[in-house]
Amino acid sequence: MRQSNYRVGRPNSLNEDLQTVIALNQNVTGNRVDNLMEKWSPNLKAIKKAFNEKVDDYKLMTTAILLENTNNYLSRQSVPNILNEDATQPSDVSFFKRYAINLLSAVVPNLIAEDIVSVQPMLSRIGEIRYLRVLFGSDKAPVKKDQTMFSNYNLGEQFEQSSYTSDHVEGEEDVPNANKQMTLAWTPVIPSSLTVTINEVEYTDDGNGKIAVAGNAATVDYNTGVITFTNAITDTVSCSYDYDNMSAPVKSPDIKLRIVTAPIQAKSRKLKTLYSFDSAYDMCNDFGMTMNNEIVTYAACQIKHEIDMEIINDLYVKATSPGVTWNIKAPTGVSLVDHYAGFPNILIEAGNKMYYNTKMAMPNFYIVGELASNVLESLPQFKSNGAIDPKGPYLVGWIKEKPVYKAPNLPSDGFLCGYKGTSLFDSGYIYAPYMPILTTQLLMDATFTGSQGFASSYGKRMTNSDFYAACKITQKPDQVHIVNDTP
């Protein structure tokens, strides 16, 4: 099995996130997750042993849910009574169920999808995925109530605000009423901090409650925030000021937390294997190998690889964060070793582009094609995973403690910088497995042809493509490396 990556031991909040999703989908409490963990504990203990105990609880909980989905499906396909399966099913069916469950236990923890995107297991074929949305809960200029503060679908402008939690209000607007008055929202106002703007002309208070307005006059009550004009004003008045947020009772702005749902439907991948009775006999007789076991291994690997590669392709093709381009050819007079040594700086530049684009996210994993892999694996600071028999996308190692994955489907000149936080909701892509791997029973027909079917069922959705930057490596001779936005 693949070794666990850098996120061993996630915070407890992540486990609570998963319990929240289960509770919302099932209308039950998070105790359901605990019950499933207990039910499938033998399988989960085997997984932990295979990972040398270095596998986090979130991955185990996800696996338990998917084991339950698969078990329920197989039970419904076999006999009506699913409460006492071993007593009512023929022995071969019961064995087949255990075999299918063990196969799933081996495949699910090895998906790199668990490490690079949010995994939200589905409890039915048609379900919902969830993402976090944080809203400003108060009108505190320039912020409007219910304006998005944070969301997987909306990043960037919310972090332009730096005064929401401070004692400053900027650009609060109103039109004086018939009594020639307007009331400031945040009080008590600090004397001498008030600036009133009318028709782009600014006026300030004198610290004694008076404002000298051209062709008019005004007073301000610092305690109530009421501004009274001598003459009527029909124009919009903009006010910027500081208020006392130290003395009790303190008026503080609010934030609101919402878990937003979006519909999703699982789709399927299917594969059928065929082999002859004679070939199976010869393999067993000559090599002591079972044809069925070999086919199952390769078919399961193929489905696993296709899931991982589909997700990676989505991230690369749909990435919208500005990327970088780097010339792999060393400039004249520069050794290849020295030139390659500058590649980590390119990763830093790509990370800073993402950070300033999203105002929050720095890449914490990389997915590389052939050329980027050649460069990274030659660097002295690269730490190899030591995999000796990799198949499909896999964790190849770490660069500056950030995991690097190889992907055979990525363009040879491409590499991807991506971000995934520690929270279930802190990702720009959601993979929603229903039954990641399912196999039918082996059938041998009258023509002595053996056949067995395999399937995978899951949903997926990109929620924020700015969490990913597609980058490119060029091979232009005799040029200094180029750093610019990828078209």
Image: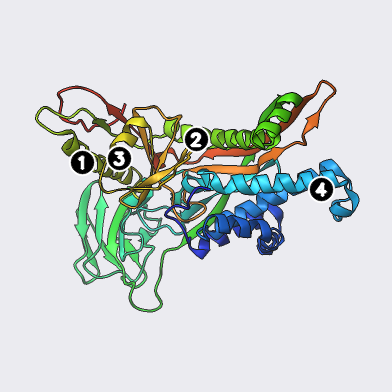
Label 4 amino acid?
Ser
The earlier-in-sequence mark between 3 and 1 is 1
Label 4 or label 1, whichever lies nearer to me, is 4
The earlier-in-sequence mark between 2 and 3 is 3
Could you say where residue 268 lies in the image, as x and y percent from the top left?
66, 33
Label of residue 341 in the image? 1
Task: Confirm or deny contact between disc 3 and disc 1 (CB under 8 A).
Answer: no
Which structural element holds mark 1? loop
Q: Label 3 neighbourhood size at 10 Å, few (<14), some (14-19), many (20+)?
A: many
Label 1 amino acid?
Ala
Label 2 amino acid?
Gly
Given the current orientation, which residue lies at the most extreme left position? 333
Label 3 amino acid?
Leu
Residue 268 visible to the viewer: no
Q: Residue at left 28%, top 58%?
A: 240
User: Mark 4 highlights which residue?
Assistant: 94
Marks 4/3: CA–CA distance: 48 Å
Marks 4/1: CA–CA distance: 57 Å
Q: Residue at left 50%, top 47%?
A: 2
The earlier-in-sequence mark between 4 and 1 is 4
The earlier-in-sequence mark between 4 and 3 is 4
**Render colour scheme:** rainbow
Could you say where residue 355 lies in the image, as x and y percent from the top left?
32, 46
Task: Confirm or deny contact between disc 2 and disc 1 (CB under 8 A).
Answer: no
